[in-house]
Amino acid sequence: MTSPHGNNLVNKRISSRKKKDINEQDIESITLNKELEIDLFNIADGCFSPLKGFMGRKDFLKVLEDWTLEDGTVWPIPIILDVESEKAEKITPGEKVLLKNTDDEALGIIKAEEIFRYDTEETCQKLFGTTNSEHPGVQLFEEKGEFLVGGEIKAFPDQHALEDSRNLSPRETRVLFDENGWETIVGFQTRNVPHRAHEYLQKSALENVDGLLIQPKIGRKKEGDYRDEAIKKAYDTLIEEYHFSDKVEFSFFTSRMLYAGPREAVYDAIVRKNYGCTHFIVGRDHAGVGDYYDDFAGHNIFEELQDIGIEPLFYHYAFFCQKCDGIVSEKVCPHERDKRIEPSGTKIRKMIKSKEAPSEKIMRPEVYKTVSNLDKKFVGE
């Protein structure tokens, strides 16, 4: 099992007694939306190790410019707490601020070390390579407040982003891997229901490691993406029908999708490193959207960065070859393109929406049946 990013798994949970003491204090508060609430708990539980809080100005700018924190540790995505100007004016640097959810429940505190303004357009250009409002990540930043609050956080022990027994923390997955006797673990991140090319990648990677962690990214997505429930149930079916139960663990990583292409590929790998994975599957167009990124930008970036302590496993196009009579990849299949049946995620979603079963050559019938039986399958329905 690999060490956490930065070598120490962060734990920013505090005791129930301290929660009571803080609740009795008359201090300023910030109300977090669901995405910020998720970030708070991901910091607290070590998913974002070595981060101990929301980024201050130096880390924020360094991440945008160099993909590293101020101390040189590779980190590609800003983890930030935004507020509107009216709230920023009420916060004094150095003071503790209560963090609440939209139901007015206390979630934790932040020591507000910095309050600073940032440039949304410049941030989006560096983070996504575009300022086009059609990009869902740009849309997310256009909704944010104009000031950022940086500082270390503490989260209360009885609050979680997702109340589900399979929403495991990095500490829990590490215990699980140890109990399984796994020394090498490959992580597979997904935001889709599985088709047979996904299954092929998972099983190909399993040939070389002790175990597989399938970890869907659960949280805010763009319209037309699969709902979280569809992804969960589809994977339950795939694992039950087509995987060895003692070789696969399934848990959730609660996080928004940013669609940041290569930056998000590195972010996803670092998070899986914190969960205990030694390897991470990077497929075609990882965390991409539209035509904003090259299909293999998520592969190439790992060649440019320093070693981040988890081994990326690169996979190219996988498809059903009618002559090979099975799912194969470009690396091993010598046949012409007209022999291929490619499992296009876009086409599969369209077929499912129109209640048309995809070919069994590209999607397991049991998986299709599970998804088709759901009343709501896609975001926006």
Image (cartoon, rainbow, N blue to C red):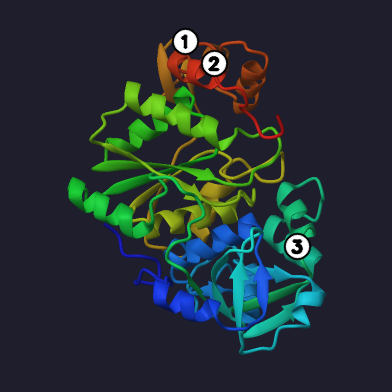
Q: Quadrant of residue 338?
A: top right
Q: Quadrant of residue 17?
A: bottom left
Identify residue for label 3.
144
Amino acid type for the residue under numbered disc 1: Gln
Left or right of 308 in this view: 225 = right
- Mark 1 or mark 2: name the one nearer the start of the chain: 1
Determine the residue positioned at 69% across, 41% down: 222
Q: Determine the CA span between mark 2 and mark 3.
A: 42 Å
The reply to whether discs 1 and 3 touch (Cβ–Cβ < 8 Å) is: no
Which mark lies nearer to you, 2 or 3?
3
Amino acid type for the residue under numbered disc 3: Lys
Identify residue for label 2.
341
Horizontal and vertical percent position of residue 149: 66, 77
Q: Report the label total.
A: 3
Horizontal and vertical percent position of residue 1: 26, 57
Identify residue for label 1.
322
Viewer-closest of 118 and 97: 97
Horizontal and vertical percent position of residue 315: 45, 38
SS at mark 1? loop
Determine the residue positioned at 63% across, 12% down: 355
Viewer-closest of 167 and 187: 167
Relative to 236, does residue 93 appear above or below in the rendering? below
